[in-house]
Amino acid sequence: MLSKTFKGGVHLKYYKELTENKPIRRVSLPQEIIIPLLQHAGAACVPIVKPGDLVETGMLIAESEKLISAPIHSPVSGKIKAIKKTCHPIIGACNSVVIIPDGKNEAEKFLKPICQDTDGLNSSEIIAIVHRCGIVGLGGAAFPTHIKLSPPKDKHIDTFILNGAECEPFLTCDDRMMQERPEGIIKGALLIMKAVKITSGIIAIEDNKPRAISAMQSALDMIHPSGQAIRIVTLRTKYPQGGEKQLIKAILGREVPPLKLPFDVGCIVENVQTAYAIYEAVYCNKPLYERAITVTGDAIEEPANLLVKIGTPVSHIVKNCGGIKGKLGKLIIGGPMMGIAQYATDVPVVKAVSGILALSKESARIDTQEYCIRCGKCKESCPVNLIPTDIAKAAECSHFDIATTLNATDCIECGCCSYVCPSHIPLVQLIKHAKRSIACQI
Amino acid sequence: MPDMIYVTSSPHIHSGKSVKKIMWSVFAALIPAGLWGIYAYGLRALYLIIASILTCIITEALILKLRKKPVAISDGSAVLTGLLLAYNVPPDLPVWTICIGAVFAIAIVKQAFGGLGRNIFNPALAARAFLMASWPTYMVTFQNPRWNTDALTSATPLTNIKHDFGFANPTYLDLFIGNRGGCIGEACTVALIAGALFLLYKRYISLRIPVSFILTVAFLSWAFLGKDMFQGDSLFYIMSGGLMLGAFFMATDYVTSPITKRGKIVFGIMCGVLTFVIRKWSGYPEGVCYSILIMNAATPMIERFTKPGRFGKG
């Protein structure tokens, strides 16, 4: 059978072999847990604890009354040390709750499913649990899931897509989750379908993960959902297959219009880890306070897939993986195509972090930029039909009106253009600059 | 002080492609055609190639120095211009002439417009047109391959047919292997195709421009260049003259041809139409060079009208 795919994109070198055979394991407790109050798209939370308070694992520590936000829970049992401004891996800096763990392991209470019968739950009850447990999209955008599960009434949703593409090189945590915990993921997916009241679901996995595909298939055969049609679709391995718009295009042939969202074309897309978090929330009453991440790169001594508590400092995790091999060139939160290079190693893991990538001095080398020779490779690789070099030239001269007419705002920032550019022009950076400037003008 | 780490915007990995690799690959792809030129027309061809490349390098280095820019000769672009210019002149051209052409190509056509990536016209072709205008006699004097006993100086197959000189036309096989008079690099069709296949395999060029260019010439020649309508000898017309070299190596020049897919096809078709028009009605027997130059000027306009459709808008 032909695997499905989309137009544009690039074939990358994946480096997944570093960790694809490493089972997900836990990390030891760090000295300090740092919980930023903004871990999601939307409004920051307000702490409901104060220094000196004792907290338990899974206890609510911050929430917000704003519509688009998600509550935050303590991942450990311990004492609040301070509430202060700290480094944040994505937004730079943020007020955070700092907790000193006391080592009491109270996590057992969330390990056993307490609710076996989910048939009795209706849509709004599921969404309420998702909201209460602070679940956000774990694919990277960290959009509060309860909002996503409550699309406007006038939108007709017909298909749920479970995103197991994991197209970023190096990262394998979703792959491992699908191999190790397929039942939970599928149960979570079924809950999502129930929450948005649809019966048709698709599990999308790239064809470079055959073991995840077979694990998910056998779990699917075992669970055998009644009244809900859910099936696996194999996608051709190509970056950025896991991008929402590319995924929908590849599977359903529908294009999400500019500035519109998946539900405008009748879809809802969730990452596999989000589905698993929903499963744990509904079945085990477990709030989202830990997630699977991949720690990898040629500067990591022992690359691994880890289950980490939110708030664990990156430096602690790196130490747990044998430390830095040789000289560290670049520390990236996320994958190599869209991840964010860090200034400091003491940033904490937040809900949106899917990987920690440490590159050696050699791999992180910055090539000298040359003139554009108009080879058009950037245009060929662009999955949203832009001409990146033209937008970049406009952005360089601060001609943001021209950048607007070239549809700069359609850019999904996947990085394909910069990746292929033989002149090493930071195209996506220039386009991001144009996007920010256009947004400021409006 | 702790070790410094790099902080840049994403992405953090790169394909490893570089301008240098592309330029030198095109250079390598052109070598077989040049070897045939030297073999067929003698060492004079080699001297012209060397003179052209050296002059290009020196001119480029001097101007970059004057412009206080890094002297990036190793990127291969000046070398490639030199090679292509030599391929587009007759093997009998005096060496000083090609040197002037090379200076013109680099100084006027390329650097005066801002250097690599900024030029409007293909430097080698513009220099050829300049030489054609300045020293036409030298530029239309061709010689047969060394082993041909008849006339030392002869006409190219296209001149022969245009002016009815009455020489016997070469066979398809002659045209395919390059057993004919012509410019240094244009004669050997098989070598040019081999080079083009290499570039296609490396995905450095696409088929859009060359195929639409060649097919247009083939169709129009078949339709209008025969004794009667639709009796023209397409194969003859696409293998004589500089069409193969022009379509695969000159019209596909990144800097001076459209980026868009549809634009490439429009560019190729228009090159073909102009080539046909010049061959049929102008005073020149060959029109590949001028047609590409004219279309170079039209490139920004073609791009404007062939922008890809917006994602999500049909």
Image (spheres, coloured by chain):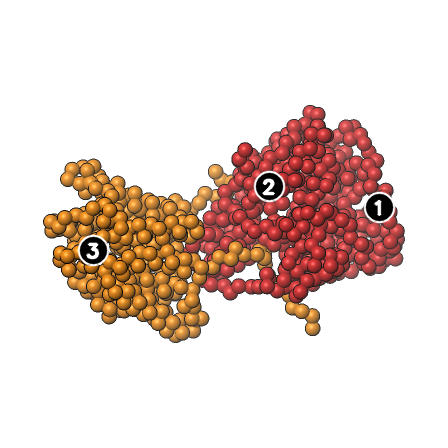
Chain colours: A red, B orange
Which residue lies at the image location 80% right of the left edge and 52% below the top edge? A47
Asked whether, in this view, residue A355 is left or right of residue B173, the answer is: right
Measured as percent of width and height from the top left, residue A82 is found at 82, 59
x 59%, y 40%: residue: A207
Q: Quadrant of residue B121?
A: bottom left
**Residue visible at 55% across and 41% down in the picture:** A236
Dot label at residue B181: 3
Q: Quadrant of residue A148?
A: top right
Badge 2 amino acid:
Glu
Secondary structure of residue under mark 1? helix
Calculate the distance from the C-alpha at mark 3 to the C-alpha at mark 2.
Answer: 56 Å
Q: Nearer the viewer, residue B184 or B253?
A: B184
Find disc 2 in the rendering and name its residue: A206
Element under disc 2: strand
Work out whether residue A267 or residue B279 is closer to the camera in this orientation and state it: B279
Q: Which chain is home to disc 1?
A: A
